[in-house]
Image: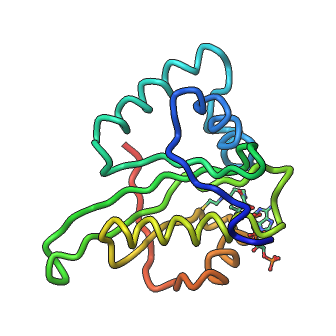
């Protein structure tokens, strides 16, 4: 698949339902998301919180032939360490289930990395649930290294 076939654009409010459907269409996501009409207000409020960061956090969709086939969230975190390095964090990565395994995910993450570089980041980091063995292989093929252990505490 040629990478020019995939287009990234910032998500708009009208994309919320489609994005939530992709987040939910996954072994782990199915138990975590709420695709009911009642759940929509939660995601709309979250979308407003993202918009209020003025670009520090951005939600993107990936389109091919006018169809939304993927999404991810890109956060830019400034810091003092490593001479004031800006780091980018990629989360909420999904390729629509009907389109997986055909190179679209790799193309989307390469575009995400380029976007991070353009935004001044000199490191891209992400975490992936330990159960997601396929996704771990996917990220390693893209050059990500398992250099750290991730720690999370649910609040
Ligand atoms: C992981 C994901 C984004 C990869 O996108 P993709 O378009 O399917 O991947 P590509 O075709 O570019 O790359 C193929 C690699 O992706 C991984 N992959 C393929 N199908 C996959 C699937 N159904 N689920 C998870 N990973 C998959 C494999 O490592 C594969 O490499 P392999 O052929 O050597 O096994 C996508 O499959 C997905 O959304 N999966 C479910 C949710 C998920 O795991 N998200 C990542 C959260 S950290």
Q: Compared to 87, does 95 lie above or below?
A: above
On the rendered structure, is 85 left or right of 111?
Answer: left
Residue 15 rendering spot, x and y as whole percentages = 60, 33
Quarter containing the N terminus: bottom right
Depth check, front residue: 32 or 92: 92
Residue positioned 54% across, 48% down in the render: 9
Q: Compared to 129, does 57 lie above or below?
A: above
Residue 47 rendering spot, x and y as whole percentages = 44, 32
Depth check, front residue: 150 or 136: 136
Residue 4 rendering spot, x and y as whole percentages = 68, 66
Rendering quadrant holding ligand 1:
bottom right
Depth check, front residue: 80 or 55: 55
In the rendered image, which quarter is residue 52 located in? top left
Depth check, front residue: 20 or 151: 20
Residue positioned 67% across, 38% down in the render: 31
Q: Compared to 71, does 5 lie above or below?
A: below
Residue positioned 37% across, 56% down in the render: 75
In the rendered image, which quarter is residue 152 located in? bottom left
Residue 26 rendering spot, x and y as whole percentages = 74, 48
């Amino acid at each position: 698949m040629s990478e020019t076939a995939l287009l990234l654009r910032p998500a708009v409010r009208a994309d919320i339902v489609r994005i939530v459907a992709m987040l939910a269409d996954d072994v782990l996501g199915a138990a975590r998301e709420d695709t009911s009409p009642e759940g929509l207000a939660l995601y709309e409020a979250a979308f407003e919180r993202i918009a209020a960061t003025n670009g520090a956090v951005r939600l993107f969709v990936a389109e091919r032939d006018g169809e939304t086939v993927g999404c991810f969230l890109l956060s830019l975190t400034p810091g003092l360490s490593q001479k004031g390095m800006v780091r980018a964090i990629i989360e909420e990565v999904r390729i629509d289930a009907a389109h997986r395994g055909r190179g679209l995910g790799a193309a989307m993450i390469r575009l995400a990395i380029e976007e991070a570089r353009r935004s001044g980041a000199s490191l891209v980091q992400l975490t992936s649930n330990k159960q997601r063995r396929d996704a771990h292989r996917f990220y390693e093929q893209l050059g990500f290294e398992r250099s750290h252990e991730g720690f999370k505490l649910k609040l």
